[in-house]
Image: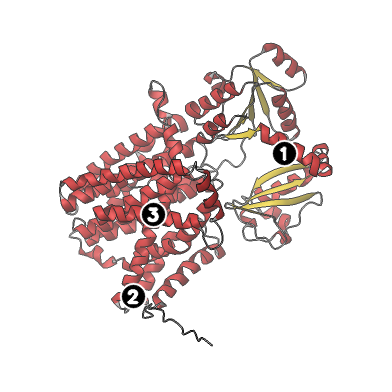
Amino acid sequence: MTQFLPIPLNISFNFEYYPLLIVAFVAWLIPMALSALRLQKLPTVIVEIIAGYLIGRFIMVDFPESHIQSLDFLALSGFMFLMFLSGLEIDVNQILSSFPKRKLNAGRFLSNPLLVGVAFFITSLLLSLASAHLLGLLIPIQNKWYFALIMVTTSVGIILPVLKGRNELNSRFGQMVITSAAVADILSIILFSFTAFILKHGFQPELMLIIGLFFLFYLFYRIGERLTQKTLFKRLTYQLSHAASQIQIRGTLLLIILFVVLAQFIGKEIMLLGAFLAGILLSVFLNKSRSILLLKLDGMGYGFFIPIFFIMVGVHFDESALQQMDQSPWLFLLALLVILYAIKLVPGLFWARIFGLRKAMAGGILMASRLSLIIAASKIGLDFGIITPGINASFVLMAVITCILSPLIYNMMAPEEMLKTDKVIIVGGSSTGVLLARRLKMHGKNAIILENNKKRCREMRSKGLNVRFGSGFDRQTFYNLHLKPYNYVVVVTESELKNTRITTMLKEEFLHPKIITKSSSSIIEKNLQKMQVEYLDTTRLMATTIESLILRPSTYHTLVESFENYKLEEITITNPAIQGRQIKELPFHKDGELILIRHQQKASIPHGDTYLHINDIVTVMGTEAALQDFREKFRSSLAAGNTNQLS
């Protein structure tokens, strides 16, 4: 009988996992502790940097250099992943749709997020350059241009969660801020890459290789565009996306490493640009609102690699370098902090005409938050010898301070409008629009129908509906209706061409985030998807309704016919007393039921042991009395007199 001998595994087991165990434990402990202490609004990465500093001084102080180098490799991988995810956050379609299509005037310029974002960055850069010369009077600065580039950075990674947590991400103001932050990220990384290359190599012909990297970006975009249209490619991708293959994850990692290696071939200082471009490239093809891949990438990045990067930033932080400055470090730190806010506050005044001075200043303060890019740029400058260890330590300290202060000050200056008007504007007095207005009225919402036929206006008014005479193509009409970013606009005229034109006008002229229309054409649907407009596929909707009548007739008729008695509603949890509590702990109205709960991007069916969190979206069904009970429990802040609501 043949005997099979084991084949020796040619892998070295000399690697020490103990340092990685410490870092992994700290990365796990921090979010758990913040949640238990109800400090979720404090950026996790800041606590990771502080924790890294502590373990670097008290635990890893005597570790061999080889152990630290292994962690540094993982930290560098985490930073590349962070740059990739930063690029992935860039909404290319939104930026492209912001390109001006009509003759510019002051009003159109200030309402265009792309143009304002570019103007914001240029103004901030000029102020930063002037400030670098002023700071040069306090301490010696070898390269003021590079110093100015470090100061002009911002952090999409901090701005995005703040706006998302306040439900402002899709508002007109949120689009302005996010676009400005995205433009700042893109231009900062490009300028850093060129500057760092020139500082290291001078003006050499190899500088054109960076431009070649952008050419490769465009080439891969064209290849991806064709591949995603191939039936075979789509079928294989779908079949291999799960279980052991995970082909989408493998392909994404291949894309990141490919661009990082190509950038590294040009120069190691270009690596962050390569990872960033890989993120933007994937962002073009990824439907982020429905992508499971995005959840998996977030899990890989923020679950493992990225925490190691920030913890190791803390481990390497050298506070003694601050004492090496010729002048008092505290005077320099105070001046630097004031300047870092000033160079963002002043350009923020671009938003004052549209949103008011207070909101504009709040946006400028939020833009002053800085994190990964300022740390990376400062570290590159330190490696090149144009940034001293003291200045590098100062910038790391400023990243920590601004990431804590900016969200706090923003929330104080721009308090959330918890109770906004429920006004819904329905463009077109079609039968669909009339029926929708009636049903919304039953929900207690103010529905306004916009109709340009005087006879139909009179008929609808006689039936008790709120109707305004006017055209959906008339911009002044929407100004007169005091259209706000949180008001829904439903475009349901009898012509799909008119619907598309009105929707395009609302998107381009008003940057309105909440538009719903209908479509039965794939060409129109593609345009609506690019503009990020919600639409109903009327053909599919009809087929789904008929399917329900065939397969679930009793359920369908019950839901339709009991509309006046039982209603569905989505409620966002904002009551801090709900945080961390289980459903079984809360007594709800007997005529109501929780149907669905969405935590972050994951939806699930709730049960008694399900935990509730701030910003969760719960779908509830019940009578009006039951819905009111749900609203009070999920939205109200507990005062001394109503604590018994939840007990």
Say which element carries label 3: helix
In this figure, which residue is indicated by the disc labeled 3?
256
Observer-nearest of 524 and 165 = 524
Q: Earlier in the sequence, mark 3 or mark 1?
A: 3
Residue 307: image quadrant is bottom left
In contact (CB < 8 Å): disc 1 and disc 2: no
Q: Classify mark 3: residues with Cα within 10 Å, few (<14), some (14-19) or many (20+).
A: many
Give the residue pinned by disc 2.
Answer: 67
In the depicted view, which residue is nearer to us: 162 or 618? Answer: 618
Q: Position of residue 632 (x, y in %)?
A: 70, 48
Q: CA distance from mark 1 to mark 2?
A: 59 Å
Secondary structure beneath dot 1 equals helix
Q: Amino acid at mark 3?
A: Ile
Residue at point 40% right, 29% down? 110
Taking the spot 48% from the left edge, 26% from the top edge, the residue there is 509
The answer to whether residue 365 is left or right of residue 207 is: right
As measured in the structure, the alpha-carbon distance from the residue carrying label 3 to the one carrying label 1 is: 40 Å
Quarter occupied by residue 498:
top right
Residue 43 in view of the camera? no
Question: Which residue, given by chain and number where applicable, does mark 1 sit on?
Answer: 544
Q: Left or right of 458: which side holds 62?
A: left
Dot 2 amino acid type = His
Q: Secondary structure at mark 2?
A: helix
